[in-house]
Structures are given as structure tokens and as C-alpha cells.
Amino acid sequence: MMKLAQVLLFALCSSLAGMSQTAKASDEPLIFRIIPQDSTIASGSKFMILNVELLNTTQHVVRLSPAGIGAQVGFANNACSLADGYRSRNTIVDPWPTFEGEIISIAPSTAYRQTMKVNLDPEFFTPGMYSVGIVFSGTFGGRNKRGVFTGSLMSNRVFFEVAEPLDSSAVPPLTTQPRH
């Protein structure tokens, strides 16, 4: 029963958050998407892993610097009642040093993908529902370079849960009976 209530609460939070965002056609040459590797993270975790994708929607090659991925990371604690309040945190970072000066080319209708490790502050991330969104800034590593995309893109926002760690003595129920 408790799990069903959590699922219904998550669905309500997702639908309420979705009402504030409107879909619109984009003139940008790229679509910036993120997907968390895990939808639930243990309270006290120091980081989360995101799969990042930049999809070229044009009929020509788009050149960019991957240093701009994660130029800004924004988190929000998505309360589902007025009593819970709303908390957010934005982090602006320096360009990734591993990509400094690197320029990549994304062919038409193909994507550039990478895995990104995002640091979490245990003081901010108490148990609850959160969302994350990331900004790509083409000026990080692409400024003053001819034919390089220097625009900014906002990723989709994805939801994840920060949950209390399971008690190590708890044993999950068996879903199938062993055969004798």
C-alpha cells in the first residue's frame, strides 16, 4: 500500500511540474537530453551519474566544444504540498579541463553521447523528490573558433528520488518460490 502511495505521489508531482513547461518547436540545431542512470539515489550519496546526449537535428554537420556540457546544473526539490516548501540550487562550473580546446563534429541526425558525474551536497539532498536540468554553453571552449556552435541549450528536466538507505538487515521478499 505504501509503495502504491509513493507511485501516485510521484505521478502527481510529475504532472504538476509538467504543467508549467510548454512544448514548443525549437530553431536550435541541437536537442540536449539527459537521463539519470538511477531514478533513486541513497541519501548521503556524493554524486549521481547522468547520460548526456546532444542530437543534431539539421542536415549539416554541427561543430562544438564538449567543454560546454554542464556549464550550469540546476536542482529543485519538488514538494507536492505547500507545507513542504520549494528549494533549489544552481551550480555554475568551469569548463571541463579534459575537453579544453577539443572540438567535435556531429553528423546530421546523429548524436554525441557521454556520461557525466554530477556532485551532490548531502546537506541539500535530504530524502524527497528532486529534478535536475543542465545548461550547455557553446562559448566554453568554442569562443573565437570559426564554424563552431556558440549558443546555449537547456536540457530536459528529469526527476529522481533521494531515499533513505535500506537497512542492511532487511531482507526483500522472494518473488518466486525455489523448486525442490
Image (tube, rainbow, N blue to C red):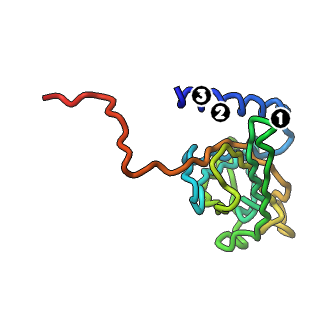
Give the residue at x 85% y 55%: 151
Label 1 or label 2, whichever comes before in sequence order:
2
Structural crowding at the residue carrying mark 1, measured as other residues with C-alpha within 10 Å and reported as few (<14), some (14–19) or many (≥20):
few
Q: Secondary structure at mark 1?
A: loop
Q: Is residue 66 above or below residue 13?
A: below
C-alpha separation, residue under disc 1 versus residue under disc 3: 25 Å
From the image, tell me which residue sits under label 3. Answer: 5
Labelled disc at residue 21: 1
Labelled disc at residue 10: 2
Relative horizontal placement of residue 114, taking residue 102 as reference (left or right): left
Give amino acid for label 2: Phe
Label 3 or label 2, whichever comes before in sequence order:
3
Give the residue at x 57% y 59%: 45
Residue 72 image position (x, y, % from top left): 78, 59
Give amino acid for label 3: Ala
Q: Quadrant of residue 118?
A: bottom right
Give the residue at x 76% y 42%: 84
Q: Is residue 98 above or below residue 164?
A: below
